[in-house]
Amino acid sequence: MKTRLCKLLGIEYPILQGGMAWVATAELASAVSNAGGLGIIAAGNAPADWVKEQITKAKRMTNKPFGVNVMLLSPFVEQVMEVIYEEKVPVVTTGAGNPGKYIDNLKSVGTKVIPVIPSVALAKRMEKEGADAVIAEGTEAGGHIGQLTTMVLVPQVADAVSIPVIAAGGIGDSRGVIAALALGAEGVQLGTRFICSTECTVHKNYKKAVLNAGDRDAVVTGSSTGHPVRSLKNKLTREFEKLEKNNASIEEIEALGKGRLQAAVCEGDVVTVT
């Protein structure tokens, strides 16, 4: 199964592993790259020195291309980008914003730039600004989400741009891959599916929660902040729902979520944490 994306990124299969904060470490990214896909380290809200450590580790664990996902809302985004320039990371994917101001610098060191986009308008803009491909992510995805479904978004983006389109959101097996290609995508990005792999270093409680989840266990919170998030329902999501129902401020809602994901992924607190 070869597409333009394989040649662009130097990979065997048109499969990207999603940039999941505190989940997508060097261990997981290098394993995916070694298997023929594109592994991605998630910078999340981590400081630049942690990101550099992960890049160094990944270079020791694989000689294949890998990427770093940069969340543009991170308070450390400028420092993280400097690390990426210095390390000449092969691929950068971006989320939660427009990476336009970084594209020229990234491409000057040979980095392929692939933004995650939630709309046709942003896909067109990213192509004009020099993006090498785009990830069209539907609302079925875990973590930060847009409004359009994958099935609605992907074919519209594929028709609107000439660069490769990568489908994401709700894809977890070969059936999803085939469907994405039929919609006009030239590759797929999978996130949640990789959490339960043996190479993923997350806490066993976190993996168990994913494996035990049913079809109605995912909920969306944070819509009032402008940055909705899909996660598994638990005590914390119910607290978010209460705050939003009572018209709490954005600051109050964001304060409730601070540090919760890291505690779930690394410490296994999946009762009070997303």
Image (tube, rainbow, N blue to C red):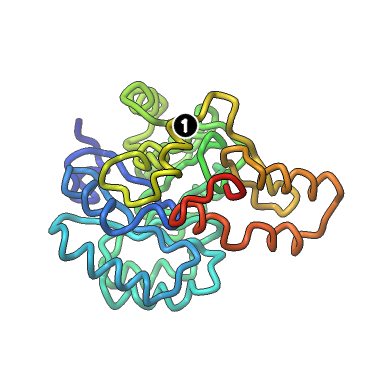
Give SS at disc 1: loop
User: Is residue 225 toward the left or the right of residue 185 in the image?
Assistant: right
The residue depicted at 62 percent of the width and 49 percent of the height is 272
Relative to 82, is 71 above or below?
A: above
The residue depicted at 85 percent of the width and 51 percent of the height is 247
Name, please, the residue furthest toward the left.
63
The residue depicted at 32 percent of the width and 73 percent of the height is 52
Viewer-side residue, 9 vs 17: 17
Viewer-side residue, 230 vs 202: 202
Q: Is residue 127 visible?
A: no
Number of labels in the image equals: 1
User: Is residue 34 toward the left or the right of residue 223 in the image?
Assistant: left
Relative to 83, is 58 above or below?
A: above
Picture coordinates of residue 56, whole percent (x, y): 23, 70
Q: Quadrant of the N terminus?
A: top left
Quadrant housing residue 107 = bottom left
Which amino acid lies under the numbered mark 1 shown in the image of this protein?
Gly
Quadrant housing residue 16 = top left
Picture coordinates of residue 5, whole percent (x, y): 27, 43
Crowd class of label 1 (few under 14; some 14 to 19; many from 20; radius 10 Å): many
Relative to 36, is 81 above or below?
A: below
User: Is residue 217 toward the left or the right of residue 68 in the image?
Assistant: right
Picture coordinates of residue 169, whole percent (x, y): 47, 36
Viewer-side residue, 268 vs 48: 268
Residue under label 1: 170
Q: Is residue 267 visible?
A: yes
Viewer-side residue, 221 vs 94: 221
Picture coordinates of residue 127, whole percent (x, y): 44, 52
